[in-house]
Image (spheres, grey):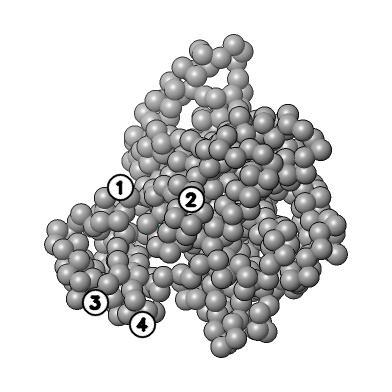
Amino acid sequence: MSKSIVKELTRLGNTDHTGLLNPIDRPLSYGTAGFRCLATDLPFVVFRVGALAGLRARQLGQCIGVMITASHNPMLDNGVKVVDPMGEMLVEDWEVHATEFVNAKDDEVAAVIEKLEHLVKEGQLNASETPQGKVFCAFDTRDSSQYLHDAAKKGCEFVGTEFVSLGLLTTPQLHYSVRCENDPTFGMAGELGYYESLSNAFNALNKNIDAPNYDKMLVLDCANGVGASKFRKLLGRIDSELLEVEFTNETGSLNYKCGADFVKILRSFPEGLDAAMGVRCASFDGDADRLVYFYRDTNGFCRLLDGDKIAALIAGFIQSEVDAAGLTGQFKIGAVQTAYANGNSTAYIRDVMKIPVDCVPTGVKHLHHAAIKLDIGIYFEANGHGTVVFSQLFKDAISQGDQDNVHLKKLQLFTKLINETVGDAMSDLLVVETILRNNNWSVEDWDAIYEDAPSCQLKVEVKDRTVVKTTWDETECTHPAGLQKEMEELIIANGAGRAFVRPSGTEDVVRVYTEGTCEENAKVLANAVAHLVQKYCA
Ligand code: G16
């Protein structure tokens, strides 16, 4: 950890890490990614979140996770989020408690803790024995992460709950471990269990498949994040006849000019990666919960295969395996996207593949909730964050069916290969590679399943991004009044397309997304909308 950051954190967060006192004069809110801001603002926040997680663990008598990361954000940011017992995001009413706890003035903290202790007691009344609960905590490679981990430990111990440090992990590895700890049928908690389960499933799904169009060589941009060392460990358990990886961006500046977010937004190659034509490349983000693919086309341009294309690839594979296994029509299969999904991906999945598509607000918790209503719920955000979830009904059917049916077997292995708890770049990468080999596809074959509608994404810096408000599904802007109307006039003047804006939950910006008749047209529209945002937010 760099000495200056420790010094600064210590100054702001008390020497013993407790940071109980709130030195911030602006409200913080538990959003899609938990609390996220400059690391120097976080010690007291993480201390309180550690305490909150400890109370939640005791309320349920189960293991709860605390992840310290700011994902794709720059090195100087950090964040903290809580993982609920099944590896899912924190339940909504506890998000409200978290916001209240963190914003409590110094003289209000005791009352908030008392209220939460009351919830713990209520939880314990409903339990047959007094549950203890524990907290698993992990962190990413940021300079501030270890320090903040210590603050979480102090907070958790402050409320008397056992704290177990899992050290440096990817975010999805922590989600997976929490789930396994509470539900051992899911797998073995911890890094080793994770590697075993994924590599066994991958090796079994890929062996003895003759796929001349599939090239086992992949170039991987690790965003200089935690995914680099963790994917090396996972790869060490994978048959080298099946997959070879050239690693780039392993130890440089975190997320700087590289990583999934950089490649997705700029649609260009990350720094440090110069791929030859047609070579399959992939990018993780800083905490390895997002994945995008890309390659250099015959014109030398970077072609992006984002979360939408990954979703379409997975949906096609699952649908054909379900049909081949003789299960057609027996289970509800669906895809879940957000308003950011490329219009042509939605049309392809819904109209060509005939798989229903649901649209929900940004944030993995919204996608996850919609997906678990299905037997096979495929959810992906365009930014590369997504996974597949299966109902118990479906899992029982594939495990109790005819074990000589190779397609049932494949589906069983697939449920082990994908990390159902949350979007996971390492697991999703192995899923994509498996499907490409099974389909005997090159990256160009995959890219050709549909053509993306020309689109553009921009970030607009404004004084206060929270003045921008949208409808539930984020497709229309409700505030500031007049902005939506002027945007619609711009779309008409532009000749075609769509446009929407929303405040980011992880960065101090308003995001603009447009689609148009061609790249230039989408870009012109995006720039015009960005000017409108600046005007209305001035
Ligand atoms: C987090 C959430 C993602 C969501 C993203 C949105 O991503 O986990 O589900 O898509 O925030 O960010 P924004 O609101 O800035 O567009 P991550 O990868 O940063 O944890």
Q: Residues within 10 Å of mark 1 (few under 14, many from 20)?
A: few
The C terminus sits in image quarter = bottom left
Q: Earlier in the sequence, mark 4 or mark 3?
A: 3
* SS of the residue under disc 3: helix
> Circle 3 is placed at which residue position?
494
Q: Residue at x 60, y 40 (%)?
A: 328
Q: Amino acid type of disc 2?
A: Lys
Q: Residues within 10 Å of mark 2 (few under 14, many from 20)?
A: few
Q: Are marks 1 and 4 in contact (CB under 8 Å)?
A: no
Q: Is residue 369 left or right of residue 103?
A: right
Mark 4, mark 2: which one is toward the viewer? Answer: 2
**Is residue 2 among the parts visible in the rendering?**
no
Q: Residue at x 30, y 56 (%)?
A: 475
Rounded to the nearest angstrom, the CA distance separating label 1 from label 2 is: 26 Å
Rounded to the nearest angstrom, the CA distance separating label 1 from label 4 is: 30 Å
Q: Position of residue 429 (x, y in %)?
A: 66, 59
Rounded to the nearest angstrom, the CA distance separating label 3 from label 2 is: 31 Å
Compared to residue 283, the image places residue 331 above or below, namely above
Compared to residue 160, the image places residue 16 above or below, namely below
Compared to residue 301, the image places residue 486 above or below, namely above
> Circle 2 is placed at which residue position?
354
Q: Amino acid type of disc 4?
A: Glu
Q: Quadrant of residue 129?
A: top right
Q: Earlier in the sequence, mark 1 or mark 2?
A: 2
Q: Are marks 1 and 2 in contact (CB under 8 Å)?
A: no
